[in-house]
């Protein structure tokens, strides 16, 4: 993840896509804009899921086994879904870099915190 963040930092500088820091108002506007772009990309991930579920239902209605139908639909969206995840990651790394947050350290720290929670939900998949 550290290499990815470093790549992202240089890439964004090369493309002139880094968070603008000319003034507080520009920084605030840039961060909000990047956050809105992230949420747009997250919505596009949801759209890929919807496509997979709709295609699965189409295959099932055509007589295909449910599991086979879903596997086929997953394969059909895999490339586009990967691009949407990459877009999300680009915005996340941009904002993490701006705040000088090491995502790898933050990730492992958060997973340890979740693992050690006393009020774990039973039967619900955690993050």
Image (cartoon, rainbow, N blue to C red):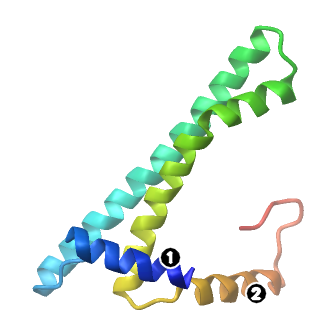
Classify 10 Å Cα crowding around label 2: few (below 14), some (14-19), many (20 and above).
few
Residue 93: x %, y % from top left: 44, 75
Residue 61: x %, y % from top left: 76, 10
Residue 114: x %, y % from top left: 75, 81
The C terminus lies in quadrant: bottom right
Closer to us: 122 or 98: 98
Q: Is residue 76 left or right of residue 62?
A: left
Mark closer to the observer (1, 2): 1
Q: Is residue 68 left or right of residue 105?
A: right
Going from N to C along the chain, the mark reached first, 1 or 2, is: 1
Q: Is residue 31 left or right of residue 123?
A: left
Classify 10 Å Cα crowding around label 1: few (below 14), some (14-19), many (20 and above).
few
SS of the residue at dot 1? Answer: helix
Mark identifier at residue 4: 1
Residue at left offset 42%, top offset 66%: 90
Position of residue 77 relative to residue 26, above or below, is above
Residue at left offset 17%, top offset 85%: 21
Mark identifier at residue 73: none
Position of residue 56 relative to residue 11, above or below, is above
Query: Which residue of the protein is positioned furthest toward the top in this rendering?
Result: 62
Kindly tell me whether residue 112 is visible in this rendering.
yes
Residue at the spot of label 2: 112
Position of residue 19 relative to residue 37, above or below, is below
Residue 36, by quadrant, is bottom left
SS of the residue at dot 2? Answer: helix
Closer to us: 42 or 18: 18
Residue 53: x %, y % from top left: 67, 30
């Amino acid at each position: 993840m550290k290499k990815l963040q470093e790549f992202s930092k240089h890439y964004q500088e090369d493309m002139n896509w880094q968070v603008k820091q000319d003034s507080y108002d520009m920084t605030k506007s840039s961060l909000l804009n990047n956050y809105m772009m992230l949420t747009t990309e997250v919505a596009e991930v949801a759209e890929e899921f919807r496509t997979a579920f709709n295609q699965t239902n189409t295959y099932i209605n055509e007589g295909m086994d449910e599991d086979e139908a879903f596997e086929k639909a997953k394969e059909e969206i895999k490339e586009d879904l990967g691009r949407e995840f990459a877009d999300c990651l680009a915005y996340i790394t941009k904002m993490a870099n701006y705040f000088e947050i090491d995502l790898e350290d933050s990730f492992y720290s958060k997973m340890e915190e979740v693992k050690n929670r006393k009020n774990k939900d039973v039967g619900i998949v955690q993050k």
